[in-house]
Image: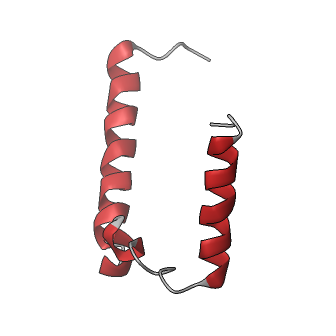
Amino acid sequence: MAAETLEQRVLKLENTVQKVQEQLAQQPATTKRGWRWFVGIYADSPDFDEVVKTGQEWRGAGWA
């Protein structure tokens, strides 16, 4: 099996990147929401309050 040239390897990489970009472009918009959709979703959750309390305790104990 002959070794690939640098040009052949770059061409394969370019083709792979193009395929990935095409796949990403075809994803539904809901998967492109980013971080903003997440803000506030646990605002009234007692579980979230417990997480905040535990985090404050850990920081007070020198964990973080």
Residue 12 location, quadrant: top left
How many discs appear? Answer: 0
Which quarter of the figure is the C terminus placed in? top right
38 lies left or right of 33 = right
User: x%, y% of residue 9?
Assistant: 41, 24
User: Which residue of the protein is positioned furthest toward the bottom in this rendering?
Assistant: 44
User: Which residue of the protein is positioned furthest toward the front in this rendering?
Assistant: 60
3 lies left or right of 59 = left
Residue 33 location, quadrant: bottom left
Residue 16 location, quadrant: top left
Which quarter of the figure is the N terminus placed in? top right
11, above or below 7, in the image: below
User: x%, y% of residue 29?
Assistant: 30, 78
- Of residues 51 and 17, the one nearer the viewer is 51
- Of residues 51 and 33, the one nearer the viewer is 51
7 lies left or right of 2 = left
Residue at 68% x, 34% y is 62
19 lies left or right of 52 = left
Residue at 31% x, 54% y is 21
How has the structure been colored for display?
secondary structure
User: x%, y% of residue 31?
Assistant: 39, 73
- Of residues 54 and 32, the one nearer the viewer is 54
- Of residues 21 and 35, the one nearer the viewer is 35
User: x%, y% of residue 22?
Assistant: 30, 61
9, above or below 53, in the image: above
